[in-house]
Amino acid sequence: MSVIQALLEAVALLFTWPTMGYVVFGVLLGIVVGALPGVGAALGMAIVLPLTLPLDPINAIIILIGMYSGSMYGGSISAILVNVPGTGGAAATTIDGYPMAKKGEAVQALTISATASAIAGLFTVTTLILFSPVLIEIVLAFGSPQYFLMAILGLSMITLVVRGSMIKGLTAGAFGLMLTTVGIAPNSPELRYTFGNLGLFDGIDFIAALIGVFAIAEMIKLSSKEGGIADDRFDMSGSALSGVKQTLNKPVLLLKSGYIGMLIGAIPGAGATVANFFAYGEAVRSSKDAESFGTGDPRGVLAAEASNNGMIGGSLVPTLSFGIPGSAATAVLLGGLLLHGIRPGPDLFDAELATTYTFLLALLIGNVVIFTAGISMVSRLGIVTRINTDYIIPIVFVLAIIGGFTLSNNWIDIWTLMVLGIVGFFMVKYDYSIIAFLLGVILGPIAEENLMRSLQISDGSYLIFITQPLSLALVIITLLVVFGPFIGPKVKQLID
Amino acid sequence: MNMVNDSGSNSRKRRQFLKAAGAVSAAGMIGLAGCTGDDGNGGNGGNGGNGGNGGDGFPEDDVEIIVPFGAGGGTDVYVREFAPLMADELGVNVPIDNVEGAASLRGTGEMMLSEADGYTLGAFNPPSTPVSEMVNPQDWPLEDATGIGLYAEDAVVLVGNPEYDIEDYDDLFNRYESGDLELFGGLERGGLYHVMALVMQAEHDLQWDSYVGYGGTAASVQAAISGEVPVALSTDTAANAAVEDGAVDLVAVLPSGGSQVFADTDPVTELGYDELDFLVSLGRVVAGPPGIPDEAQQVLEDALRVAMESDEMAEWAEDTGNVIMFEDGQEVENRIQAAYETIPEVVDLDDIRDASN
Amino acid sequence: MSIESVFRTLYDRVNMEYGLLFLMLISASYMIWESFNFRIGQAATFPRLTAGFVVIGTILLLLRPILPEPIYSFVAKDARALDVSEDFEEQTREEEDIEPDEVTSLSTVDRPLPDAVFTTLAAIGYVIGGYVAGLFIMTPIFVAVYTSWFRVELWVRGVLVAISVAIAYAFLTVLNVSIDEGEFLFTGGLL
């Protein structure tokens, strides 16, 4: 089947009633579940999955994909308004989104998020429609050694995002890494620090850690503040329109972040949170005034939100082509495909190309829905930052704690959330980088598992990390990230 | 405690309502069935059944099925499909509770430690869950679980990277023996697939050098596609797409009964290798804690049988390519016990716990 | 001496940063020690590496005040700021940051506990109560107690309690999360 023919067929399939209605419904539902901490894309989709049984397969999958896409944007809403990342993919959004809200720029932040999400989504999905076969090759170029090196590259970003004492930042990062060693060891049946408790077998849930250090820590801090979250000294400045303008004024950052997201999404096992932090780290690295990040810099929100929606299209490639789900949400999507008798396989990029295009086009339309809903409805939620914090705090606690329990019906998650909430409160207070800590928590398991596996494959030789061109490239990029700031100026001096 | 009693009486009221609803709609059941939502938590009149087992007998309350895996996963998809059909048959709700984690030991443990009254069941997968329990012994006797029924079966297969051009299991055997190949891929160390690999090494004399574990069947297949390992273990369903496309070669089908997905390929037992069905044939079962009264067990087994043999399930299996079947509770208990008796005989579990190769 | 002034004294005397560092140091030391009990040597590599890093980092930070000059600068200051004047700025900024703040501030609602302390305790109480009797029943109680403490208008209290119950009920029914079951009370579920 030719590409054009498939595309036309997909258009004919999609632009019918009620199919279009399902796109809108899926995206809106996704925005809601994404904004609820602990629920997120995967669980929301799993709940809806059996309800899609009466629908025909295309419509059912369109709802699920719409939810997936909507939830990535939805996650940013609670991240910006109350410092609670609704999904892991919005973790980096909180870093600048919430400070913007505190400065009275919540409406702007929400608009930037919607615009960046939608535009990055549009570009990456269009790219996928044109180049998905190439991306399949990229997926396959990544093996265990490359996953490990990606994790190390991510960890090296700690040096970019830390302000003040580097030792404090590195210690916070190592502390995060250390906590991930709780639970059954990757690639061996060794139980580490579980005290015989089954709830600890799988270690610390990183979403619980996210909710703890962002939401709980911030609520504790906020409880002594009078008035709303937004500082009274600032007017509710910034309109929806200015948010759109700000986003459009940074096309390079926007597209770069979106494509970073897409590439990371295509690598199974990394997912939205990693994409989010990578794009954020790159935004900080490439800026001339890195200090303004973390204090409510719109570029932080833009990069983070462009990346997580860019990630979606990328993550569909391994899911649809090989049935390899790269994340919890795509695992549920895979369940949905199987439930409805759509067999993932390279056929979906060949004989069944029209089906795949229908999904991708649904994503495109979904991005329009995100933009429209974001500008017209969600941005009004900026008012939340004016509500007295005494009203907001108890409700955020209820959402965070019940949401934390929802993660996997495990009380360990709630204890994690509370303990790390209190620890996080003091970390923020004494300038121990929360971002470094979270990078450790998120990348620790990926790093350890793939390190161990790589060494098994190479029979213990570390050469496995530099013998392939892709590995070597990752090593060099990592070295540049870490030492670039020291070496760069010297090199410049030499040239001059 | 009052509250608990209240809850009981609520459930009874709900059941009476459901029975009434069932009586009214019984005639229309066939037409309606398959359209019922199954969020499993009541509030959905469509779950009403025909209350076929009326009277004072079992069940008088909701029958919960604990799924020790995440929502939307392989086991969950099956259970969400048949639970409403069981509910129709039992005349009560059959809610699903996902209690994931610890290689299915958390959810299975919760089921094993619940009261043996037939109101709490679990859906797990022997011999996978028993192996996890043998490697990390728990204080509940999984080998004594009350079997309700087996509803599906997956065959374990070996897939190979096409560049290695491995013809079949004999060829693989020779390539390991000659030292041409060294690595062998599968799922996490200390789990069922690692045990399989060790048993194949011991019983089939398959001389792989180093076992490489991955996070799931899909990741294992991907490792074979990319050539990170020459061959990898997987289930037949998980390997299907990649084999069809030629991204991997099907090297061997391990259970003596063959695979429904790869019906054309002879199992390795045909090549003269010892049968290892207790390990390589993965059952998906429903079971309860030890000591469920026979009556209740019978009612539940019948409900699952009716559900699995219904037209709706057949249609679903047809549409989706999922394999369904039914074997009774005795068979479930036999399989669990076989795992507990045979596995420690053929592998040293202490070796697994200390495994370094 | 009121409870509040006890807190204030405690807070002034005990720098909580040391608390944080000791917590990290002790947990890291425990993890290293425990890793020698692992049966599989491989599984101990990563914990020792990361915990070892934490131990070194925390010890350096704990000994900050008595470190000799070159090491002091390395530990306490922005490693990237090569310019001396910037260093100085950074340092003064940091010192300003360590002003007593939230925790020592008076209770904004004229209660005997500082706000942040009460909020923390209330949240811990909510979680423990939820563990014992289920989060569902504890949710309205937590919201009621919290809003009463902060002297929220009565009608707003009512609205917030209603919202919290609605949230909890939605999780319970739509998402089928068993938050109506406690570990000790209502173990069979409240609803």
Image: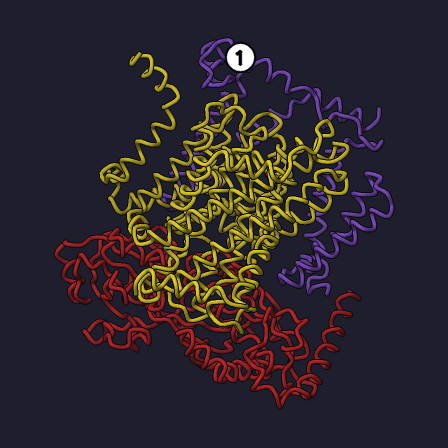
Chain colours: A yellow, B red, C purple
Q: Residue A93 location in percent, x, y?
A: 55, 39
Is residue A288 placed above or below B101 in the rendered structure?
Answer: above
Q: Residue A138 location in percent, x, y?
A: 31, 48
Work out which residue is located at the far bottom of the displayed protein and give it.
Answer: B27
Residues C130 and B74: in front is B74
Where residue A212 sits, quadrant-wise, is top right
Decide: few, some or many residues near mark 1? Use Cα within 10 Å; few <14, some 14-19, many ≥20: few
What residue is rendered at 34% in x and 42% in y? A451
Is residue B58 placed above or below B144 in the rendered structure?
Answer: below
Say left or right for A443 vs C191.
left
Q: Is residue C145 visible from the viewing direction of this image?
A: yes
Say left or right for B347 vs C69.
left
Quarter of the figure that contains the N terminus of chain B: bottom right
Disc 1: host chain: C
Residues C104 and A118: in front is A118
Is residue B32 placed above or below C47 in the rendered structure?
Answer: below
What residue is rendered at 53% in x and 28% in y? A293
Q: Residue C166 location in percent, x, y?
A: 73, 57
Residues C151 and A417: in front is C151
Say left or right for B295 vs B349.
right
Judging by the rendered image, the residue that carries numbered circle 1 is: C66
What residue is rendered at 61% in x and 36% in y? A98
Q: Residue B48 location in percent, x, y?
A: 65, 80
